[in-house]
Structures are given as structure tokens and as C-alpha cells.
Amino acid sequence: MSENTPLLQMEHITKRFPGSIALSNASLHVAPGEVHALIGENGAGKSTLIKVLTGVYRCDEGSIIFDGRSRNFQSPDQAQSEGISTIYQEINLIPYRSVTENIFLGREMFRWGLLNWRKMHQEARTLLERFHLSIDVTKPLHTYNVATQQMVAIARALSFKSKLVIMDEPTSSLSNDEVATLFTVIRQLKEEGVATLFVSHKLDELYAICEGITILRDGQTVDERPLATITKLELVAKMLGKDLGSVQKNGQTSFDASRHHAETRVLLSAVDLREGRKLHNANLQIHAGEIVGLAGLLGSGRSEVARAVFGADSLISGVITVDGKETHFRTPQDAIRAGIGFCSEDRKADGIIPDLSVKENLTLAALPTLTRSGIVDHKQQQEIVERFIQRLGIKTAGPEQKIRELSGGNQQKVLLARWLCLQPQLLLLDEPTRGIDVGAKGEIQKLVEDLAEAGMGVLLISSELEEIIEGSDHVIVLRDGTTVAQLTRENLNQDAILTAMAHGETAGEVS
Amino acid sequence: MMRLEQRFSGLKARGFWPRDPRAIGQTYGALIALIVLILFNFVFTRQFNSVISVMDLLVHVTPTLILGVGMTLVIATGGIDISVGSIMGLTGILTYLIFSGKLFGIHNIVLGTIVAIPIALAVATLIGAFNGLLVTRFKVQPIVATLITLITVRGIAEVTVNGFQFAFLSAPLVSWLSGNIFGFLPRQVVLIVVIVAFFAWLMRVTAFSRYLLSVGGNSAAARLAGVPVSRVLIIVYGLSGLLAGLAGLAYIAFDSAANPVTDGVGKELDAIAAVAVGGTPLTGGRATILGTAIGAIFIQLIRQTVVSLNIPDDIASVIIGLLIILAVFVQRQRKTA
């Protein structure tokens, strides 16, 4: 990396969006033929940085030097023809067209004005053979598995004579064998002098293939160095912005875990949950009256655990016991009847019904209890809504206001109330305070606390370690879909969680 | 003055008064357009010279209006049902075949009619529920699922009778349904008033209506809130089928004939137009039954107005199209935030 001039130099990149700054003073350096890791939590600015590089966005400040020239790509097309190819997580090829068509889409070969199929098929085969892949290139792309499709995407990238290939979470839908094949290809690219920018959350993979790393946090590059000189633990700490070994100050959140105490009654136990590539051997236990924190990096399977328990996604295997009885929830309805509530991570995508009123959103799950022979008891409904608007301090013009007109924090309160009015015994909260203002955040934390004190069991999923540490009686750490640590109050601290996130032994590694 | 202000904001909060002036067009657009059209008719045509002519208008609009009610429910779930015209046609011919004794050998026409109506309506409902099953269980897009039904059901109707048309002026169904109450009020008009009132009530008070709107508004969220999404959809498509069956009965009663080849052809499009003009967005999540009724009447009134002004047919279609665009424009949707 030292002698060669870098292939890519991005300096002082700043990108503002209306009302927020996505990147401020970010930088990225990639040497020719280097496999470079780009890492950061949700919202750290990874994808914005990539989009600035590939011409999807224009940066407000900063300079990009690629291949010795100062560049400012105007479109992804231009970036591609200048030697930067991007392979997205969701493969953006055309599933119903043949492999050949996908590789040559947009620059087909002609002969006397007609498509020269023979030549294109031949070229496609040659390209794929470089990866020891001999498939029928005339068959539609979707007839092949995801790994093969990804190889086709890479072959397409190479046919542009790319100097830099950007791979955005390329392994998220690949099996272990397929990952190994992908790594072989990346090494081969390296030999040919093609650099790879590798975006992934799977630390083991980064250490297996990458040479350098750039860590982004809050839109800034916080570290840039050879990967061999940083431990996984330091890496996780940097990514989350925590200092190792620092004494945790209390009172950063409105939580006070000393206020509530776990009862002996086990509300929920989940053993060896498995779901496709997302969960392998995830375990969990929640007692009445306790808050169980669920920590883990992005993609570690936190939300998947909650969804599986709630019956929203189906499992391959695993035993879930609620209140001592083994259960097999097939739909969320079953879970709701068993006294479980679930606030999902993405309020907009699977929380609110935007066009319905606050009242209707709040009582949606409770309708079966408010209904006599199909007709809603409006008086009772109104009463519940008014009670919860008051109790949770929901700021709204009235119960009839459309929920989409409310602020994020107030929407979240309505969604919490949707479950609280059912008086559940167990509440699953997936990032309940993400993206809401500080005031509402504190109120929600305090509310969750009160609920636990009153005997409810709470599963708290959060990316904020403060929330997890100060709020939980008990913390479970997930890594790559496996429960790698169970920490109780006595040994609960930031370093322990970070260590588990970085090093915990996973089921995936054993095989 | 202050008190007036307070009452006004109270109305706003309860949703009786739109918060945004632009929403007036959205909420009452179809009604305003209808009133303008009626005023136009008073001045320039002889459309409303008698109660009978008003009733005549309502009788003409009956099938479209009944289909429109079912279509409103389906569209509110974010789907569409283009099979209703075919279901109408099949119900008509099936009813005829039963009460005329050709199908079950019941030769008493009164008894035949009593048997025919429930069977025809049950068949229509089942076909609708089958649409729902295609959409939920087999994940076929609504427009494709109901297109399959549109083609198949029309084919069945034609095959049953080899494409003949049947007139049955003397059938009790015809004389009864096309008869009047109190000497001036056609039973068909009573039927549509009952249907519109019932479904408007249903959409106000039942849990089912909230489920339906939540599925249309955000089905992923509805599922996580415990809404039985598949069951709701199957019931909605079933209701649309049932209403198409009723529309079929109303149609043969009006026509005094059942023609499997032409009955109900293109009616699904009239129903969709009525829904759109009425102010129900085709993206789902909202519904107004009353709006659809107004929309259907509006479209029918344009048609009759154009005819009564002796405008040639081809030009008339263009005018109808333009006026529908205008009506939709007046109540155009605000972008969702």
C-alpha cells in the first residue's frame, strides 16, 4: 500500500441532506489490487459514501481522485465505464433474461445490425470460466442459485475492465461454501490487479479476506489502517464509538435497572432457534418482571429472534415455551392471544397504518376484545384511546387525527399503546427509541421500566449500548445468529458486551 | 366568536370538517360535481321534468352502483376485481335456467325463482371467494387473478346456453323487482338504497371494516397487529362476488332478458370509474361507499345528459371521459407524507 500511489483517494467528503448531514469529513483510500473493508453501523454513512463515489449522489465538499485523476462522476454509468463496478446486496440483474444477456446488457455485440449471439455466448463462457464456473449461459439467470447469480454480477463487472469492484454485503445470502468460492474469486481479482471494496458486518469474513479497513461512524472516518493492526474488539469499540475499559457512567438514559426485579416465573424460553441463514442456535429466556436486553451488531439476527418468537416468521427448528407451555405460533394472532406484544423495528414499514387515525391505530390489535358480534363498542374504544393518550402523553390534535401526521416519538407511543391496552404479559420491543426525539425517548424508557416493575416481561432490542446496559436485568448477545453470551447484572458492562459481539463463538464457525 | 371557533376546531378534530381546505375537494369533490351537473340539467335539459325521470336514472344506475360498492371494498384493500361483469352475466343466465326449469326441472316458476335466487347468489359469492383464494393462497396479483375469472366465468356462461339469449317478460322476478312501492318508488331503487346504507354502516361500525382498511393501508403492519389478512381478503372478494350476483339479478329484471354473451360486459370498468370519481384512492387504505354511489350516479347522469342533448355517440364518449377526468382532478389525492 505504501509505495504505490492509491487507486482511490477520497478526502474530506461532506454530503448534506435536507435536515441532516450524512457525511462530514469522510475519507477512504484504496490501493491498487487491495481488498479493503468498509465498516460502520446503521446510519454511519457507508452507503452514502459509496453512492458519492459511484455518481449516484454528488458530494457537497471534498475531492475524489481515482486512477490518478480527479473525478466527480455524474452517474453510475459513467463510474462504471471508468472502471468502478458495484455489486449490490440485492443483485440488480434481470432474473428472467439469460446469463449472457445480463452480462452484456447495454453493450450488446452486433453483426450486420443484428445481435451476435454466438460471439456473446462465447465471451460470456470465457468470462465465467475464469471463476471455474461452467454453466449454460443461455438459461435465464433466475434458474441459478444466488451465489452463481453473484458470480454473474461479478463477471459483468469484470467485463467492464473494472479497476475497483465494490461489493455491498455480498455474503449476506450465501452459504459457507459459496462464501469460500467468492473469496477465491476476490483473490483472483487481486492477482489481476483489481481492487475490491468489501462492505460487510461479518467480522470473521473481513479478517479472512481484507487487508485494509476504513471505519465510519456518524458520517466520519474514525479509523483507517491495515486490518492486521486492529483487534476485533477494538474494531467493534471504534465502530460503536465506545472506549474500551472506560468506566460506564450511569444516568445516560432514563433507565434504572435497580427498580425492577426478575421474578422466578419464566415467561418465555426459546431454545436453539434456527431460521435459514439468519439464526443458528439462538437462545433466550425472559422472566416475569424483568427487562432482557438483546444486543448484537447489525445483521446478527436480533430482529429475527423477536419476529420468530412472535410467530411473524417461521422457523426451521427450535422450541419456544410461553408460561411453561410449548407453543407453535403460526401467525402473530396466536402470539397476541398468548399475551405477547411486538413493536417492530421499522415503524413506517410495519408499524403504523398511515391513513388510519390515532384511535384506529391504537386499538387495532385490541379490536377483537372491543367487538360484540362484529360491531365495535365505540364508547369503550374512545375511553381506551383517551386513557392512553393521557397516560403516555401522546401529543395529538385528537383521536381522529391521522397517525402519519404525528411525530416519530408520538407514533411510537401510539404503537406501544396498541399493545399496552391488551395488558400483555410479555412485550417485545425492537429499537423502541430509534429515530425519536430525546424527550420522547426518556419517556418511553421510563414507561418500559414501569411496566417491568409492574411484572411484565420485556425484551429490549437496541443498538444503543447505554440503553441495554442501564435498562436490562439480563443481557443476551447475538453474533451471526447465535447466542454467544448471557450476562447478568453482576458481570454486565460495556466491555463484556463488546467482547461477546466481537469474539463470541458462533455455530457457524464450528462447522 | 370564540365559542364558534372552538366548536369549529372540535368539528375538525372529530373529522367532520376537513383540516385542510384542499381536502374539501377531495372529500366532497364528487358531490360538488354532481350538484353542478344537476343544476346544468335543470337549466339546459328536460332531464328532471318528473319524479319518474329521476327514478329512471336511478334504475339505470343500479347494476353499476351495486358493483361499485363491492369494488370500493376490494380497492380499499389495495386490490381490484375485474371479474364482476362476468359474474353478473353468469348469475343472470343461471337464475333464468333454474326458474325456467331447464336446470333442475322445477317447472313451477314461482318455486323455481325462490330456489334460483339463493343458488345464483351463492355461486357468485363462491366465485368471488375463489378470487380471494387466488390472491392470498396462491399470491396471484389481483388484476391477474380476477382476469382469469373474468375469462373463465364468461366462458362458462356462454357454454351453458350456446350463446342464446332468453327473454322472460313474464317471470315473477321481473315483475316483482321492476315493480314499484307506493306506486312511484321502484324496488330496484329501494335495493340500492338498502345496499348503500348497509355497507356505509358496515364501514363505520364493524371491526371488519378497520381490518379491511388496515390491510389496504399497510398489510405487513396489519399482520403484525394480529389482523387475519388472508381471511379478510377472501371475505372482501367474496362480498364483491355476492354484490356482482345481486347486480346480475337487478340487470335481468331491468332487461327482462338474460344474455350470457353481453350481460355485464365492461360493467367492471364502469364500477371502477364510479369508485375513482367517488374519491376512493386506487392505492388502498381508504374507502367511501357514499362517494362511490355519488360517482356512479354522476357518470350515469352525464351519459343521459349527453344523450338528451342529441350529441352523437362517439363525441359523447369523449365528453364523458373528459368530465370524469375533471371529477377525479377535483378530488385528486394529496401526496401521503
Image (cartoon, coloured by chain):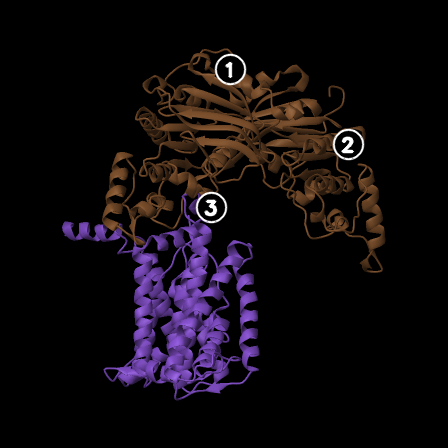
Chain colours: A brown, B purple
Instruction: Quarter of the image for the N terminus of chain A: give it.
Output: top right
Could you say where residue A458 lies in the image, as x and y percent from the top left?
39, 28
Residue A496 - label: 1
Which chain's residue wears label 2? A
Q: Name the spot of residue A63 as percent of width and height, x first.
A: 63, 31
User: How dense is the environment of label 2, judged by Cα within 10 Å: few (below 14), some, or many (20 and up)?
Assistant: many
Q: Amino acid at mark 2?
A: Leu
Q: CA distance from mark 2 to mark 1?
A: 38 Å
Which mark identifies residue A322?
Answer: none
Dot 2: what SS?
A: helix
Q: Is residue A166 left or right of residue A331?
A: right
Q: Residue at x 39, y 32 (%)?
A: A427
Of labels 2 and 3, the one closer to you: 3
Above-or-below relation of B65 to B279: below
SS class, disc 1? helix
Q: Quadrant of the C terminus of chain A?
A: top right
Instruction: Between residue A397 and residue A255, name the one nearer to us.
Output: A255
**Residue A30 visible in the shown view:** no
Q: Nearer the viewer, residue A355 or A36?
A: A355
Q: Are marks 2 and 3 on the same chain?
A: no
Distance, label 2 to label 3, CA atoms, is: 41 Å
For the residue pair A505 and A10, the one nearer the viewer reads as A505
Query: In the rendered structure, which disc, 2 or 1, sits on the residue that comes first in sequence?
Result: 2
In the image, residue A211 above or below residue A334: above
The image's mark for residue A189 is 2
Say whether mark 1 and mark 3 are on the same chain: no
Q: Chain of mark 1?
A: A
Front tag of 2 and 1: 1
What type is the residue that disc 3 sits on? Answer: Ala
